[in-house]
Amino acid sequence: MRAVLVPGVLALLPEYAGLEDPVAELRAACLDAVGWLGADVTVLAGPQGRKVAESLLGSRQARPTAESLLGSRQARPTAESLLGSRQARPTEVEARPTRVDGASYLVVGNGSARRRDTSPGYVDERAIPFDADLGTRLRTGELSGIDASLARELWADTEAIARLDGVLPPGCACTVNYEDDPYGVQYWVVRWEW
Amino acid sequence: MNLTNPDCVATIANVQSMWQPLKLGHRTYTDGLPLVMAIVNRTPDSFFDQGATYAEDKAWQRVRAVVEEGADIVDIGGVRAGYGPEVDAAEEIERVAGFVGRVRAAYPDLVISVDTWRAEVARAVLEQGADVINDAWGGHDPDLVAVAAEYDAAVICTHAGGLSPRTDPFRQEYDDVVAACIETTVGLAERAVAAGVDPHSVVIDPAHDFAKNTFHSLELTRRIGEMVDTGYPVLVSVSNKDFVGETLGLPAGERMHGTYAATAITAMAGARIHRVHQVRETRHLVDMAWSIAGRRPPLRAIRGLA
């Protein structure tokens, strides 16, 4: 079984694509990790995180190439098509998953958005130790007891991460593919296999 | 354009589908984005710069500056549009042809347009590597499009209201100035294609101020979307013109803000090529307008999205 953690970064969504990619390195790590999951993927995420997860999973399908697009000539598009297809927004968080042999989990979550004065939530001195602790938990798979109340205060998205508790077996193999806070929000891309 | 975002490819593709490819000589644009054409006068008497770039070294500095400021195209002219001393074809060729060759050699990727109504001049500059003939006097020389076709060059088809070159309007009226511009420019475009010009290399220009009073040019600006709807790429040349000056009561050197307003409105409506004096400002302005219109993604967006 495999599981992947990606952050719920809205800049990963096609509808928010600029000409230059502000999260190119993160995107590459996410796509590589999501491509490593099996076909049967259970998404653990809140509503916004689910959009990111589904977008990344959709990218595993044939992504249109520049060449194929350059060849296409259609009638004038509608405003909707120009702005990109927007997926329906799920309203419920997934129920706690059960173990399924061969299944994969795609988890959406991240650390604090209050790490420094340029962070979206400005600075909270508790953020960096909180993220350090969360990083250790991700590596060891010890995900019980994350302080959900503190996480909310620190603008961290840990609800889906906490739901991996009981899914990951003790000591399962973990690889951290990305660990950085380029915009003052702590991101990880992590793979687990057991 | 430097595209680094894979998701942006899909958005750009949607934008592209609004437009046919635009082939300007050696360059073909398939991205549907707006283009800035910088005016480079090799004239001693043009209305805006009063001959500031007549001398070759000054014109050369101007080309270097506008390329640095983000111009996609330079439009080199050797004859003032308004009244003035006679400039015959030989003198016009002397002013522009060699200069085109020099620009071509130094800037192989730059699109070079030459503002001329004469087939003879067109041939001379196309021999030197020009990409576009800006026929600002609306088909006055019927042989011009055949020459453009011979060199696989683009042509800008302009509404000059039937006036001879370098003639000001006098009591000219229209039942519908926009309809007249469409009829004339589309007619010229069809004639160009019939003469062998690539259909993707034909641009139409209503020619603000040419054979038009200020009310006509304001109406053209307001209704430029009707020209865009013809499907031909539209060039607008409003830069510092008299209709801006008369509207605001300002002399030639103080019309840039009025020009920017007209440029923004025509860009919003989809006018594709903007022929201007102020390049850097226009680059920002048309890119911004294109993005507001939903045809160009922001360069790089992370605010609220991290």
Image: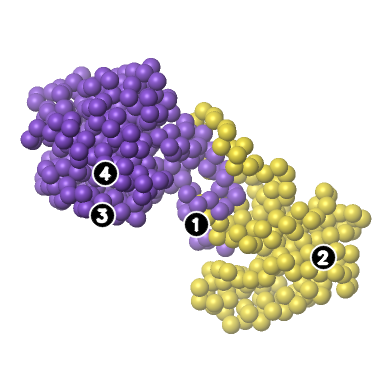
Chain colours: A yellow, B purple
Q: Amino acid at mark 3?
A: Gln
Q: Secondary structure at mark 3?
A: helix
Disc 3: which chain? B
The quadrant the C terminus of chain B occupies is: bottom right
* Vertical arrangement, residue B24 with respect to residue B292, above or below: above
Which is in the foreground here, disc 3 or disc 1? 3
Residue linked to disc 2: A192
Badges 1 and 4, same chain? yes
* Vertical arrangement, residue A114 with respect to residue A14, above or below: below
Q: CA distance from mark 4 to mark 3?
A: 12 Å
Whether pointer 4 and pointer 2 mark residues with C-beta atoms closer than 8 Å, the reply is no
Disc 2: which chain? A
Q: Secondary structure at mark 2?
A: strand
Which is in the foreground here, disc 3 or disc 2? 3
Q: Amino acid at mark 4?
A: Phe
Q: Position of residue B268 (x, y in %)?
A: 36, 40
Q: Position of residue A20 (x, y in %)?
A: 52, 55
Horizontal side of residue B230 vs B122, given as left or right: right
- The disc, 1 or 4, on the residue closer to the chain's N-terminal end is 4
Which is in the foreground here, disc 4 or disc 2? 4
Q: Amino acid at mark 2?
A: Trp
Whether pointer 4 and pointer 3 mark residues with C-beta atoms closer than 8 Å, the reply is no
